[in-house]
Every structure is written in C-alpha cells, then in structure tokens.
Image (cartoon, rainbow, N blue to C red):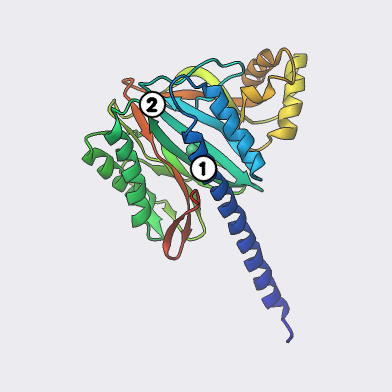
C-alpha cells in the first residue's frame, strides 16, 4: 500500500514522540533504581560526599547522564546543597535529609526527591510532603490550572499542621531544559497557566514547621553556564572552556571541576562576577524550621499524570 507524504509525516512525528517518551521513561527507571539504593547509604557517620559520588557514578553506569549535581540538603536547608571537593561532612542521627537527584537520557530529564528522616521524630513532616505530592498527582486532569495544583498541595500540607514553602516550586521541563518557564506553586495562586497533555512536569511539595519561606544562604556549590566573555584570569579562561564543552545546558558542581585546574575556585569566583556563570545559593528556611521534600516527574497524558520516576 502507498503511504502518502502527508501520512508519512504523521508516522514520523509519532515515531519521534514514542522515542522521546521511551527516553523519558528510561531516565525515570534509572532514577528510581538509584534512589532505592542511595537510601541505604544515608545513615549516621556516612559522608555526604560518598553518597553524591555514588549517585552520579551509578547514573552513568546504568546508561543515563547526570542532569544536575546530586543535592543533599539537611534539616533547615531546603535545597541546593551539594558536597564540595574534599567535603568531610557526615550525616548525624538527628538529621532530616532531602536527597534530590536528576537523571537524563538524551536531555529528557527525570527529577525526583525523597526525605530520609534519620531522627525518626519527623514522620508526619515527611508524610505531609509525600501525601501532598501523591494527592495532587491523582487529581490532575488536563488541562489543569497550576494555581489549583498549588491549592491542593497547600491544603494537604496544612492538614498535617505544617506549612508549604511558598517561594519554592515545581517546574515544567523540556529537552535539556530544567525550567521551561512554567512553575508549579506549592500554595494556592491565581494563575492563567495550565499544564496539558504532553507536558513533562516536576512536582515538588516542601513542608516545614518553620515560617514557610526560604532565603538565600551564602554557600554556592552548584552553577550553570550563562554566556561567554573575554577574560583575563587564566584559570577562569580555562574553566570556562571546560564548562562550555561539558556543561552548556544543565547545572554542574564545583566538585566536578576540582581536577581541571589548581586555581579552579578562583576561576569560578571570577566567572560568577563576570556574569559567565550563575551560582545557585543554598536555600534555607526563614525560621530555620525543619524541611521535608518529595518530588516526582510526571508525564501528562489524556488519562492524567503518569509518574516517570518509578520502576
Ligand atoms: Mn529536584
Ligand atoms: Mn525539581
């Protein structure tokens, strides 16, 4: 039978979409496997550095790529801590740990996080963010208003007696793009934005017994490339070349550059002040409250939201 040109284009587009979904689901499966194993490594006296290195090496071993540095944020730090080169920090028996991991396959990203409560005193805080996530996922019917999603998250977290963190949000993703521009709030909001069939969405409720907002800490260990510029400092020039080659799209860690140049830290500082790279500050709860986070990536289909970050 003849296939007309028009039909051929439709078939090609369908093939492309199937391929994209296969890559997205593969990234999610790798993510789920890593999380399952990494949980067992998070225990008192274990080094944060070893967990981060394990997660990132395992990602590549399983056939994925690292979408962003492994985030290990403890207690009142909500997000964006990643171990630095030579980091000696260890977990303590009182820690509430957020492990946030990003895996990609050809740019299709699986972004997900869990809370590990080593203290055993924050079971409900952990449950509040989990319940908020699974409730909103169940209630997604496309097209869905993002303000409504925030409302559901807020209601569930508040029903536990905690607060959602209002200035942290989920995000719609595209190939090699972590934040496409649409955010998923963790509180009720008036918004004209909707998520719809075909969207890849990271949903990440944060719950706290603190104020319900984060502020920027002083530490920056995760960066992203912004633009090139002529630079005088040799270490900055050298580091920038490496960044442009290896990390043009997605965030990278200070740790990943440690072996590239003896003066890489001065280079990074120079690149930040020159506007060539952006440094993500650690995000700390305003009243230094405890923070829990649960995150999944979902693909929006006609039938609702399909979780990609599970086995
Ligand atoms: Mn995440
Ligand atoms: Mn995310």
* Image spot of residue 104 (x, y percent): 61, 44
* Image spot of residue 238 (x, y percent): 77, 21
Task: Please state if 49 lies on the left or on the right of 76 as rendered.
Answer: right
Which of the two labelled residues, at mark 1 and mark 2, occupies the earlier sequence position?
1
* Image spot of residue 136 (x, y percent): 34, 50
**Res 111 label:** 1
Task: Residue at 51% x, 30% y: name it.
Answer: 71
Q: Exactly how many numbered labels are in the figure?
A: 2
**Res 229 label:** none
Find out whether the residues at labels 1 and 2 contact each other: C-beta distance under 8 Å. Answer: no
Task: Residue at 33% x, 20% y: name it.
Answer: 288
Task: Residue at 45% x, 65% y: name it.
Answer: 302
Residue wearing tag 2: 214
> Label 1 CB, ligand 2: below 8 Å?
yes
Relative depth, front residue between 149 and 58: 58
Quarter assignment of residue 23: bottom right
Q: Is residue 159 above or below residue 223?
A: below
Is residue 189 shown to the viewer in this render? no
Task: Please state if 130 lies on the left or on the right of 248 as rendered.
Answer: left
* Image spot of residue 110 (x, y percent): 54, 45
Q: Is residue 147 above or below residue 211?
A: below
Task: Residue at 74% x, 21% y: name it.
Answer: 260
Say which element carries label 2: strand
Task: Please state if 290 lies on the left or on the right of 55 as rendered.
Answer: left
Quarter assignment of residue 290: top left
């Amino acid at each position: 039978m003849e296939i007309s040109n028009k039909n051929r284009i439709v078939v090609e587009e369908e093939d492309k979409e199937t391929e994209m979904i296969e890559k997205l689901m593969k990234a999610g499966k790798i993510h789920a496997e890593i999380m399952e194993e990494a949980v067992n490594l998070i225990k008192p006296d274990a080094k944060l550095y070893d967990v981060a290195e394990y997660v990132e090496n395992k990602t590549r071993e399983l056939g994925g790529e690292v979408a962003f540095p492994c985030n290990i944020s403890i207690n009142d730090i909500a997000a964006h801590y990643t171990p630095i080169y030579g980091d000696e920090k260890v977990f303590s028996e009182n820690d509430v740990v957020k492990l946030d991991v990003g895996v990609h396959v050809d740019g299709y990203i699986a972004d997900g996080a869990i809370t590990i409560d080593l203290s055993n005193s924050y079971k409900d805080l952990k449950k509040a963010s989990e319940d908020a996530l699974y409730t909103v996922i169940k209630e997604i019917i496309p097209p869905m208003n993002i303000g409504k999603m925030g409302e559901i998250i807020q209601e569930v977290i508040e029903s536990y007696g905690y607060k959602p963190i209002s200035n942290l949000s989920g995000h719609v993703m595209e190939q090699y793009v972590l934040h496409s521009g649409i955010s998923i709030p963790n509180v009720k909001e008036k918004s004209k934005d909707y998520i719809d069939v075909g969207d890849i969405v990271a949903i990440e409720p944060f719950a706290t017994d603190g104020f319900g907002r984060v502020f920027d800490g002083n530490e920056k260990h995760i960066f992203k490339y912004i633009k090139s510029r002529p630079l005088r400092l040799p270490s900055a020039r050298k580091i920038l070349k490496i960044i442009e080659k290896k990390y043009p799209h997605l965030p990278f860690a200070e740790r990943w550059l440690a072996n590239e140049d003896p003066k890489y830290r001065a280079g990074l500082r120079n690149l930040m002040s020159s506007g060539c790279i952006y440094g993500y500050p650690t995000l700390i709860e305003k009243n230094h409250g405890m923070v829990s986070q649960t995150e999944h990536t979902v693909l929006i289909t006609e039938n609702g939201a399909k979780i990609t970050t599970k086995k």
